[in-house]
């Protein structure tokens, strides 16, 4: 057989075409690795997360009531007892997402697993349920920042998915979702205007109350609501003190003043702001100590 060499420019062109073709082809389906503690639902597959971020329930201060309720619901779920899907709502940075991740840290050794899913992929919930239906582990399907715009019609199809697929009798599958909106949809002032005021131009529906009921019916699919509220300065400083002392550093007036300056620059007092300041301060102190040791 005769051998011949292709010109370099043709080889480069073919290589480029193959790379572009590879990007457009669907991803090869792989069986999920159920040895992982957490997963990300991506391209209709469970992508394992072998080292999820470690969060601890004891680090979440000022939300004792919410912790008690979500822990009780999760323990019921782990024991195969009736448990509710949970909607966590409230101000940003108050611990809604952290408390769900902390549950994984606390109960992974008891078979708890976490599946993170994007809002746009929620229609795949029946597929996820089918994949894990024969597994002995208990799976929390977690959707962060679940919300819809006023013009978004996807929430109608999601209602039937939540009410049908998740309540179909599965004992190893539950959903926890977080949102900054209590009813997952924007609410407007004119929706609370008395119906007798027919001169209000926004009233284009014959039965406006029915439209309002349809909006809130999505959040009603969640059996348990947990609300998270903005924190005051005292609680913010307590959280900073907790993290500083946990790292073995001294909490003093300088730390207090810098932490207050930090939250003022951020425009909010929250658990997230306290945690981020603590990382900044602890890292700076440890870096300074390393530089001193090396000099």
Image (cartoon, rainbow, N blue to C red):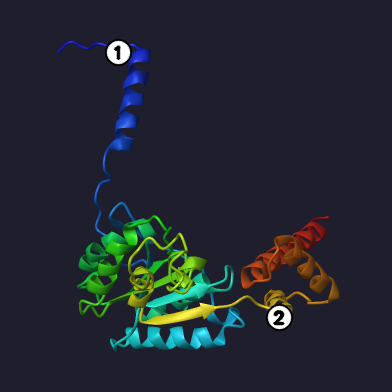
Q: Is residue 276 left or right of residue 57?
A: right
Q: Is residue 166 visible?
A: yes
Q: Is residue 166 left or right of residue 260?
A: left
Vertical side of 63 occupied by 152: above or below? above
State which mark lies toward you, 2 or 1. 2
Marks 2,1: beta carbons within 8 A: no
Residue drawn 43% across and 67% down? 198
Locate residue 277: give its quadrant: bottom right
Crowdedness near tag 2: few (<14), some (14–19) or many (≥20) residues, C-alpha within 10 Å = some
Q: What mark, if any, has residue 6 been given in the picture?
A: 1
Name the spot of residue 247 as percent of width and height, x first: 69, 74
Name the spot of residue 156 as percent of width and height, x first: 30, 63
Residue drawn 58% across and 73% down? 94
Q: Earlier in the sequence, mark 2 or mark 1?
A: 1
* Position of the N terminus by quadrant: top left
| Residue beneath disc 2 | 238
Name the spot of residue 233 as percent of width and height, x first: 73, 77
Q: CA distance from mark 2 to mark 1?
A: 70 Å
Residue drawn 45% across and 78% down? 103
Crowdedness near tag 1: few (<14), some (14–19) or many (≥20) residues, C-alpha within 10 Å = few
Q: What secondary structure is found at the residue carrying circle 1?
A: loop
Locate residue 114: give its quadrant: bottom left
Q: What secondary structure is found at the residue carrying circle 2?
A: helix
Locate residue 118: give its quadrant: bottom left
Residue drawn 44% across and 83% down? 70
> Foreground: 90 or 194?
194
* Position of the C terminus by quadrant: bottom right
> Foreground: 258 or 89?
89
Q: Is residue 180 visible?
A: no
Vertical side of 77 occupied by 37: above or below? above
């Amino acid at each position: 057989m005769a051998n011949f060499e292709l010109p370099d420019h043709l080889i480069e062109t073919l290589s480029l075409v193959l790379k572009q073709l590879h990007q457009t082809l669907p991803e090869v389906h792989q069986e999920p690795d159920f040895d992982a503690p957490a997963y990300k639902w991506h391209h209709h597959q469970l992508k394992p997360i072998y080292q999820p971020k470690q969060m601890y329930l004891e680090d979440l201060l000022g939300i004792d009531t919410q912790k008690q309720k979500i822990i009780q619901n999760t323990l019921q779920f782990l024991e195969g007892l009736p448990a509710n899907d949970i909607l966590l709502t409230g101000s940003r940075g108050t611990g809604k997402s952290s408390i769900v991740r902390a549950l994984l840290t606390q109960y992974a050794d008891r078979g708890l697993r976490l599946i993170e899913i994007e809002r746009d992929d929620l229609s795949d919930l029946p597929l996820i349920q089918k994949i894990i239906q024969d597994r002995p582990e208990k799976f929390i399907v977690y959707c962060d920042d679940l919300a819809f715009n006023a013009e978004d019609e996807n929430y109608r199809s999601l209602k039937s998915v939540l009410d049908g697929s998740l309540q179909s009798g599965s004992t190893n599958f539950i959903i926890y979702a977080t949102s900054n909106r209590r009813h997952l949809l924007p609410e407007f002032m004119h929706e609370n205007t008395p119906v007798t005021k027919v001169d209000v131009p926004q009233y284009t529906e014959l039965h406006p109350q029915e439209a309002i009921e349809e909006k809130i019916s999505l959040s009603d699919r969640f059996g348990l609501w947990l609300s998270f509220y903005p924190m005051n300065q005292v609680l913010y400083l307590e959280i900073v003190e907790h993290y500083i002392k946990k790292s073995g550093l001294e909490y003093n007036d300088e730390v207090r003043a810098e932490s207050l300056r930090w939250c003022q620059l951020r425009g909010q007092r929250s658990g997230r702001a306290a945690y981020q300041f603590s990382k900044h301060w602890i890292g700076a102190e440890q870096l300074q100590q390393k530089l001193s040791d090396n000099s």
